[in-house]
Image (spheres, coloured by chain):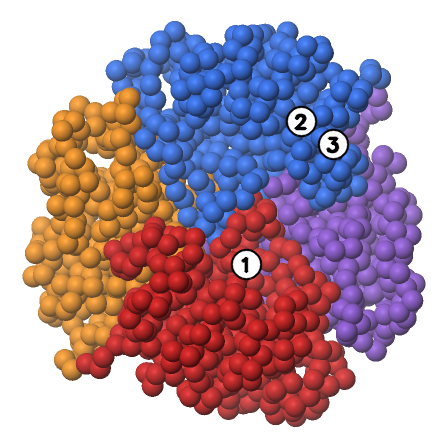
Chain colours: A red, B purple, C blue, D orange
């Protein structure tokens, strides 16, 4: 058996950290050797994730102790934006590969980062070096990357259904791109606040950061421009759903031509993709069907009277929308089977 | 004290029937004297609604026994479409007023009814006589109506925010009207099926009847034409939410002019309305805040880059979206205080 | 019309404060004139409770400003334990009646307070003066009380079904009293923490404060002693349910005799009680059926083989378990109709 | 690589069938070759389980077609009780091993089966031949069994924590065994009915089949007798929880002696068990932490005043409570690694 690659997780106590641990605990080619938390250093992993009791026996350490530990092959960085960029350059210098699950390396242009995050980027040179980790689109670049900027959860759910249409130049540029997206509460992270307090979020649904305020917008627009060669702004409405995991995105657009047969197009792009499933006409994606899995379900419909096309996509925000895709990228970066550790179906019901 | 009006509920065992009973149990000017159910005749109301134990002491009867009972002043009809129209004409002939909570009298044109419900309308003459019971818009006509077609839940949530803009001719006709709406499961009624089985609906969200298939579409388009004088098709995406009650509708459109100050416009139309509340800019409607109440919360935002306007509205589908609005209409029809029996705030949390 | 009584709410921004405001907004004999919050002073009520938009137009003030305001007839005190007792004596001195929704005046013995709350009671003399506000049991004393200690939510749900059996001396003293109780998350208050974070509480159920640690235990045991004349310890297992509102308590015990017909006994005690409903044999209480209402549903069953009796009770923890019962007590204290403002049925579904 | 064993699933469209398919799709040593459904014959598996789209490509067939198909090594039978026993003998005769996930072979005594299921058992001789598939207890017998009666979900959650105490003769026989158990809705199966309709089950909790009516009682009592050598009746209160998956059982009992150190005892019995995890004192089992996994979490506490011991256990009713344990048994029956296909941690959050 081949030697296992060794990975560390920096910021292991949030939901994306926990999801990395859950998935990697079953990965045949990887061993997690190092987990950090500034606040919970000294605690065992199963104190923070009782679901890992008897499965993972690691003690959390402070980042400052990384130096002394044996060097892993890769670090997953699950830190808040602004913090990751203080750490990543020094890690890269040691020859360790990095997959950053946060926002610090997703935008190519420092000015855009400054505009949306109100921070000067500390290592703008890395922005062009970093590869955007939307696996199905950038697979080739990811294989040789040393720094992967793992996509946001909303962007993953939105860009996968849009990619074939934009790449083929089929989207009517005069019609608006309207994206109505709904996310489970785990997308807001593990830090308690009033909005994600059970009694406040349960049995409701609420739009938030409306009016072009959500920080995933520049990331989505950047990739739309990459796919189509043309910048166009989107209208994006994120909404908080009373479920733990899952995103459903509905995208409204028009096509330049009526002649396109969408099913064929999607098959052309995604038939060989292990994790992208195009649903049969009439079936609708539902995040419940991909819960805990790395799958993305895509569907579409056409309004016969208005001609508006609706694209639907469902992912698990913590898996394909974060840690699952990160592991998919890791597999590529180390020449492992791309689906390794990731092929479990969604947990239904 | 004035004499109470007497009402009967035909089809009292579904959710809209139960909601009528809940609300009317506290209405100072109304007494429910007659409740029917073909399947549960002979049972007590609290066998079907344990929440009414000790509160309502009525026994369900078959419709066929109506003749023999004392004639009420009004019947609420909560029957499936197609069934109501077999019964309503004979009830009207007796001089009883009718509020139909189903779809049989909502569409003005028999041909439209036939197209969407695949049935010939049995009393097409009543279609023009029936008043569409969107209270805030048709208050005057409702007061003198003998047959009110109570609006659907989705249409209520969509038409209230659209009305001021359409009435003033402000909506850009070249831009699509896209409506992304999400409903709690009680909107699908009380008959169990696989889609509304707890384990299937819990922790998911799923678009359904996509591609111009939902029967609320012609009702919405008819009223849009009434408001604006111009027919225009909509794109409508209904989605099933894992909550018991509540609808959130998001409407995307553009305005003809940038000069309109939406807050002023909405105030002009709704400031005196007891049940329509315009939220302060930045706040988003959430059906959780109107749960169990007759209130409609409306908000809006503008995308500063694309110019797209988003309207947001939240109602309780069983209250303002059905039984609450029906009682509001009843109050008008009998000269009662419009808010009588309806003024309770939403139950939060 | 009689003049309205004026009430103030001290600590109005938590869930019990919000529930008081919701219920009192519809109370015909009461006007809320004063609401306090140390943290949110200056804000409007609807900023904290959007469900009250257009319904309550009050601005939160600091407690320190009470002096300058017009004196209300009653204060509801919804402060954390330990804080209420710093304030209540001075309020009482002004001749204002008090209903304390917290724990400071529930225990008769200062030593017990010290043991469970790890604080010396600041006004132990008031402990014997305060009336325990379990309305159905202490109605007479409440009518003339100037300080009512409103019961905890768990105790209310547990003491109402136990009272008739204990009062009649029917409970087998040699058999343990085991109470397995489950509460919705709003019972834990409005302050966000990790345990009540949506993603942590959703889709789970977890016992907490097991092994005789929950502070409602001495309150329950004190009343059991009052009812039966005999102290006996209970075994109490509180559990957190993934619902916003509601408590289901299951109580296991044995009776001294097999000759008792429970239905008759409960009828004797509760048939005239407006808010206590004894369910027919075979029906089980469910907090869903009393949601948002002041009702308590009680049921029972007997295991034919072991002879164990199970009592079941369901309340809404915020209504009968807190603010509803407080208003019921207020009605008694001011000679108002006991059910005034409280008679709405539970919201189902 | 060793040849894969071939299995068929009879009754593959319910939740236990779906869970078998989900788990077996990742099992390295098994291939599902045959799936049946009388109602959905001819459909593809992913039409019934969209979560298996692109993962399992099997078509449902009628049971009658089994003859013609290649003979598998094992059949999982997931049929309603009463139906399984019409089929199992003929399957066994062909030399196929059987794991029955239903109730037909769990009770050793035909009379008990008749009493609880109101049916004469058709093959009473098989009742003694069948091995009760509680893996941790009957591992040795299971290895050589040809017919395994897979335990019910409640019994699994209750017997695992009870076993060590009963086996060691530590439980006080004079104290009642009270079991307060709560199950997610998937435990009620996939057939829609009013009790499991989303709007009825959501935001509530309800005891059902109270007063010694639940059919898991004889199964639990039979095993208690097996473990301890002594029959004793239990008091069992099943309750329906508003979650899709998961059971929490709380068991109240007393011990004969105060000298026992429970943590040591549980370690002795379960320390080497891969799927039974004893939580540290103070931590409580929560089905959320074992969701989708084959793990059973066990905790306990002692009331210092009453001496009552509470045992807590959490499982996923569809995994360790049904299909996961069935696969664990299959692994044993075919000499595969016992954890094969089962070692994934619970999905949290």
Q: Residues within 10 Å of mark 2 (few under 14, many from 20)?
A: many
Q: Secondary structure at mark 1?
A: helix
Distance Cα–Cα, label 3 vs label 1: 32 Å
Q: Nearer the viewer, residue B272 or C223?
A: C223
Determine whether, in the image, residue C3 is placed left or right of residue C341: right
Label 2, on which residue? C10
Quarter holding residue C237: top left
Pinpoint residue C138: horizontal percent, then vertical percent. Answer: 54, 11
**D79 or A20: which is nearer to us?**
A20
Query: Distance of mark 1 from mark 2, alpha carbons?
Result: 32 Å
From the viewer's perspective, is D31 left or right of A87? left
Name the subunit of mark 2: C
Q: Circle 1 is placed at which residue position?
A: A188
Work out whether residue D274 can be spotted: yes
Q: Chain of mark 1?
A: A
Q: Which residue is mark 3?
A: C61
Do the residues at discs 1 and 2 belong to one chain?
no
The label nearer to you, 3 versus 1, is 3
Residue at screen point 10% across, 34% down: D169
Q: Which residue is at a point 48% across and 33% down the rendered structure image? A: C247
């Amino acid at each position: 058996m081949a030697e296992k690659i060794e990975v560390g997780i920096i910021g292991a106590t949030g939901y994306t950290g926990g999801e990395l641990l859950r998935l990697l605990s079953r990965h045949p080619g990887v061993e997690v050797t190092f987990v950090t938390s500034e606040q919970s250093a000294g605690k065992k992993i199963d104190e923070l994730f009782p679901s890992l009791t008897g499965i993972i026996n690691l003690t959390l350490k402070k980042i400052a102790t990384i130096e002394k530990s044996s060097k892993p092959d890769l670090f997953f960085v699950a830190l808040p934006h602004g913090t990751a960029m203080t750490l990543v350059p020094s890690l890269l210098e040691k020859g360790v590969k990095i997959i950053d699950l946060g926002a610090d390396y997703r935008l190519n242009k420092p000015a855009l980062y400054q505009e949306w995050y109100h921070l000067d980027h500390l290592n703008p040179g890395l922005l062009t070096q970093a590869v955007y980790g939307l696996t199905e689109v950038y697979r080739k670049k990811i294989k040789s990357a040393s720094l992967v900027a793992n996509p946001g959860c909303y962007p993953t759910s939105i860009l996968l259904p849009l990619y074939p249409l934009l790449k083929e130049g089929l989207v009517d540029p005069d019609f608006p791109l309207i994206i109505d997206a709904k996310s489970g509460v785990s997308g807001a992270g593990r830090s308690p606040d009033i909005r994600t307090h059970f009694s406040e979020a349960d049995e409701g649904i609420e739009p938030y950061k409306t009016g072009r305020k959500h920080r995933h917008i520049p990331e989505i627009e950047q990739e739309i421009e990459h796919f189509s060669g043309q910048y166009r702004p989107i209208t994006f409405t994120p909404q908080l759903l009373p479920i733990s995991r899952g995103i459903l995105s509905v995208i409204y657009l028009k096509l330049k031509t009526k002649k396109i047969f969408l099913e064929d197009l999607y098959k052309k792009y995604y038939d060989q993709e292990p994790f992208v499933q195009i649903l049969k006409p009439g079936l609708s994606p539902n995040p419940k069907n991909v819960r805990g899995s790395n799958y993305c379900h895509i569907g579409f419909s056409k309004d016969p009277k208005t001609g508006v096309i609706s694209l639907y996509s469902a992912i698990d925000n913590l898996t394909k929308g974060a840690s699952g895709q990160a592991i998919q990228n890791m597999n590529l970066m180390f020449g492992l089977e791309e689906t390794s550790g990731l092929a479990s179906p969604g947990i239904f019901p």
